[in-house]
Image (spheres, rainbow, N blue to C red):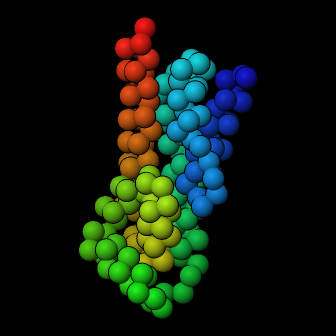
Amino acid sequence: MSDTLSLFSLFSSSFLSATLLPGSSEALLVTLLLAGKSTPWLLVTTASIGNSLGGLTNIIIGRLFPLRESSRWQASAARLLRRFGSAALLLSWAPLIGDLLCLLAGWLRLAWGPALFFLCLGKALRYGIVAALTLQGAAWWQ
């Protein structure tokens, strides 16, 4: 597989992983790191951008919903996000919970700047940690 195709596959997988659709971006990142398909910083950056754009898509979708609380879980989740604000989006990388946080951030109309900052930071930290652990583990086994 060429480097360009590898990067496109990683971008696509990481974008899908940030939505409710299935994706396995961490597994693909680890595979590409171990195969030496590209530089680690480029792989981490590609995965982070794709996953952040997927999270941004969820925020935009959340903004399409009317701003009214109709269930208990919406009310409690909204209280949590109102309490911690955009900083709660540091957890946007977490499976299922992260998708919900992004949807709620849009639904609550959180400010774009802080929301995008914490969203991107959380996603980049996740892929950076996965890459560091992968490369450290690979060096240990050699």
* Position of residue 70 measured from the top left corner of the image (x, y, whole percent): 48, 91
Position of residue 49 relative to residue 3, above or below, is: below
Residue at coordinates 26% horizontally, 74% vertically from top-left? 83
Residue at coordinates 34% horizontally, 72% vertically from top-left? 81
Residue 113 visible (yes or no): no
Query: Of 109 and 22, which appears nearest the observer?
Result: 22
Relative to 48, is 125 on the left or the right?
A: left
* Quarter of the image with the N terminus in it: top right
How many marks can you see?
0
Query: Of 93 and 114, which appears nearest the observer?
Result: 93
Position of residue 55 relative to residue 85, above or below, is: above
Relative to 25, is 112 on the left or the right?
A: left
Residue at coordinates 63% horizontally, 44% vertically from top-left? 13
* Position of residue 101 measured from the top left corner of the image (x, y, whole percent): 43, 66
* Position of residue 129 measured from the top left corner of the image (x, y, whole percent): 38, 35
Query: Of 116 and 34, which appears nearest the observer?
Result: 34
Residue 48 visible (yes or no): yes
Relative to 124, is 79 on the left or the right?
A: left
Farthest residue, direction left: 83
Relative to 10, is 127 on the left or the right?
A: left
Farthest residue, direction front: 141
* Position of residue 79 measured from the top left corner of the image (x, y, whole percent): 32, 79
Query: Of 87 and 22, which appears nearest the observer?
Result: 22
Farthest residue, direction top: 142
* Quarter of the image with the C terminus in it: top left
Residue at coordinates 67% horizontally, 23% vertically from top-left? 3
